[in-house]
Image: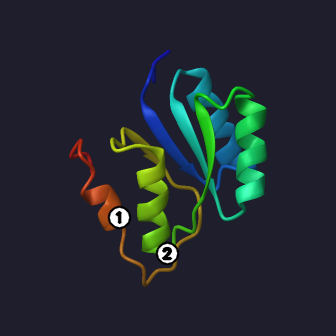
Amino acid sequence: MRLKDKVAIVTGAASGIGKEIAIIFAREGAKVAIADLDQKAADATASEIDPTGKRVVGVAMDVANEQQVDDGTAKVSRRLEVSTSLSAMPASRSWPPSSILNSPNGNG
C-alpha cells in the first residue's frame, strides 16, 4: 500500500487509461477523485472502484476551466498529495493552475 491515505485527483478518469490509473491508485491505498467532464460517468466509475463511496468519489471537472479545477480540488481535499493529468489542454493555457501551485503541501 504505497499510497496509503494519500489523495489523488485523476483527470479523465471515467474511462480508459485514467480509469486504470485510478484503479491502481485505489488498490495502493489512495483516496481517489475520479475527475471527468461527465459527472455521471465519473460517479459510475467511482462506484465501480469503491461501492462504499468512502475512498473514491466522482467530481465534475473541466481542466481548461480554472474555476472548475479550483472548485473540484476544494471538494476533494484541502491537501493535494498526488495529481495525475491525462486530459488534453490547450497550448495557450498556463500550467499548473493556481490551485495546484498554492496547494498546502507545497508540491505544486
Q: Which of the pair 79/92 is nearer the observer? A: 79
Of labels 1 and 2, earlier in sequence is 2
On residue 30, which mark appears?
A: none
Badge 2 element: loop
Q: Is residue 18 above or below residue 60?
A: above
Badge 1 element: loop
Q: Amino acid at mark 2?
A: Asn
Q: Which of the pair 55/15 is nearer the observer? A: 55
Q: Which of the pair 74/15 is nearer the observer? A: 74
Residue shown at 64%/56% (left/top)?
12
Q: Position of residue 42 (x, y in %)?
A: 71, 51
- Name the residue carrying label 2: 65
Q: Does residue 81 appear to the left or right of 71 in the view shown? A: left
Residue shown at 25%/46% (left/top)?
107
Q: How is the image coloured?
A: rainbow
Residue shown at 44%/54% (left/top)?
73
Q: Position of residue 103 (x, y in %)?
A: 27, 51
Q: Which of the pair 10/40 is nearer the observer? A: 40
Disc 1 to disc 2, how far (Cα)?
12 Å
Label 1 vs label 2, nearer the camera: 2
Check disc 2: other Cα within 10 Å, few if <14, some if 14-19, many if 20+: few
Q: Does residue 97 appear to the left or right of 16 in the view shown? A: left
Q: Position of residue 77 (x, y in %)?
A: 41, 43
Please report contact status of discs 1 and 2: CB closer than 8 Å, yes or no. Answer: no
Q: Is residue 65 above or below residue 60?
A: below
Total marks placed:
2
- Quadrant assignment, res 28: top right
Q: Amino acid at mark 1?
A: Pro
- Name the residue carrying label 1: 96
Point out the residue furthest to the top here.
1
- Quadrant assignment, res 33: top right
Check disc 1: other Cα within 10 Å, few if <14, some if 14-19, many if 20+: few
